[in-house]
Amino acid sequence: MTIRSFFEDAVACSPQLPAQRFFQGNQWVSRSYAGLKERVIRAAAVLRHLDLQPGRQNVALMMENCPEWQEIYLALAGSGLAVVPLDPKLRVNEVHHILRDSEAVAIFAGTRLKEVIAQAVASLPDLTSCVWVGEGSNMVEAVKGRISCAYEAVTNCAAAAYESAREWFENHRPNEGTTASIVYTSGTTGKPKGAVLTHGNFTENVIATLAWVKFLPHENFLNVLPLFHSFSFTGNFMIPLRLKGCCSFVRSVKTLADDMKVLKPNIILAVPLMAEKLYSRITEKLNRSALARLLPRIGLKAVIRKMVRAKFGGKLRILGIGGAPTDMEVLRGFQSIGIPVLEGYGLTECSPGVAYPTLDSYIPGTVGHILPGMEYKIIGTDATGAGELCVKGPNVMRGYYKNDEATAEIIDADGFLHTGDLVRLDDRGNIRICGRRKALIVNREGKNIYPEEIEQIIERDPLIQDVIVLGYRGAGETSERVGAILVPNAEALEQKRAEFGWTSDAQSEEYVRDAVSALCRQHLADYKLPRKIVIRQEALERTSTMKVRRVTYARALDEIRC
């Protein structure tokens, strides 16, 4: 199957059901599958206008979440063009690298990105066309030496042009092996590489996920996470498409609480940072409410759960978390207040789903079982049973774009993709993620230490805004010790400063170090304790999915012998 066949099936079977909900012109708008099909044909008019060549060319898509993102993607991938999704927050040099490496010949971009795009494409003669999408697109100046056009101007075509676009789209169809997306990894440990993902990769992953997780037909998915990332792309776009469901766009993260009440989602997908903030806000309000504190004591906890679910719109069936490990306290906390939570596991190179639990068998701290149709092996296990997870299946990428060397490093001769993630299996066969192989700290006793485990402990301290745990070497040493770089919570620290009357930063930093050290001693074995703690005020550098960019801090704590 292809992404286009998913779409055409939804249009044929459920033409009047809502495909998208979004805020436009000061009101909420619902667009049916029939309406979306018309928009896709109009988007295809742009592709025809630019004389793009399906099956032979790659086209970049760099926009914030919006309904146009989906219609443009369906027109591009649906006609056989390979889509290169980009994070609209990338810097000029990062955009330049991806456009050059992917050999994109055109880009669809939000109007506010004009300056970034103009600088990034200046030395890329093969990228010949820029299409501006969004408010003010008619006013955007042309990029020197490039064909520039306003998306809305071309899509508002006359009847004859619309019919020509429909015929063009009908005559260009992908197959399962056609490249749908070239998704560039977020680069936590190095230069981003383009994972080549086919239509079959995505559709097989969706079919396996639905067979396991048991989503329901026509479910309403709340779209908060960026569509350029594979987790949101598959979870908030491809899965609803297969279910003939709806993708509901929030206005912004700031309006999330209000939007949930209006949109009433069945499914919300989140990364850990978002989930932790949601949980924190809920528990904060519950702790401030005398009624909320009283009800559980008199056997009315169900009332609390109903109150909490109402804040999510009242129809929430699943809160799915992915992208990185989530604090166990948050997972158990959601369960205790009646929010059905699941934590899954995947990676871009696998389209992205690899393992998910089911609602009736979920154990917090695990990510369930490997999806149907996939094979796996765990190699290089240590004394605790942790080893690297390797997977094989129809959702695994073809390889990295024109990078055979990098592909050979991650996919072995038997076709298994080496995930770089260290895992253990529990007695029920559930997968527990221990950490990244490259982030693993090996001390002088030969013990394996997982930074993620220590980070989750430190993050519990309300004084801490951000943390990265990493190995460092003492002067002249080859083995590693445990170190941590901390960013304090400025507001919480200011309250302590006023309480204790500190007059210098040194006093507050010493307090933070002592508090973190005490917390670690309470929860961790002695060999896992941070021996060096560095305090910094600037936020840690993160990827688009809010993972700390570890490559930035590698060897930052090493001691050099003079």
Image: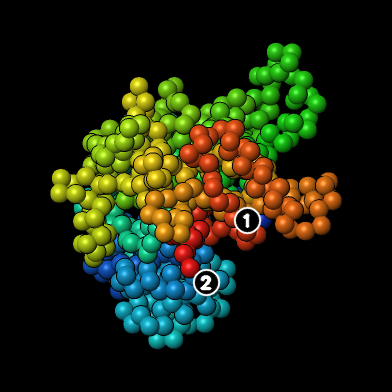
- Above or below: residue 94 compared with residue 148: above
369 vs 119, left or right, is: left
**Residue 535 - label:** 1
Q: Where does the image place residue 418, in percent across and percent down from the top left? A: 27, 47
Residue type pointed to by label 1: Ile
Does residue 64 appear in this view?
no
Q: Where does the image place residue 303, in percent across and percent down from the top left? A: 69, 21
* Mark found first going from the N terminus, 1 or 2: 2
The reply to whether discs 1 and 2 touch (Cβ–Cβ < 8 Å) is no
Does residue 194 appear in this view?
yes
Q: Where does the image place residue 488, in percent across and percent down from the top left? A: 66, 52
Residue 172 appears in which quarter of the rendering?
bottom left
* Secondary structure category for the residue under label 2: helix
18 vs 47, left or right, is: right
Please state which of residues 27 and 545 is positioned toward the viewer in this rendering.
545
| Label 2 crowd bin: few (<14), some (14–19), many (20+), radius 10 Å | some
Residue displayed at 38% across by 62% down: 190
Q: Where does label 2 land, which residue?
A: 113
Q: CA distance from mark 1 to mark 2?
A: 35 Å
Residue 444 appears in which quarter of the rendering?
top left
* Secondary structure category for the residue under label 1: strand
Q: Where does the image place residue 28, in percent across and percent down from the top left? A: 61, 49
Please state which of residues 328 and 114 is positioned toward the viewer in this rendering.
328
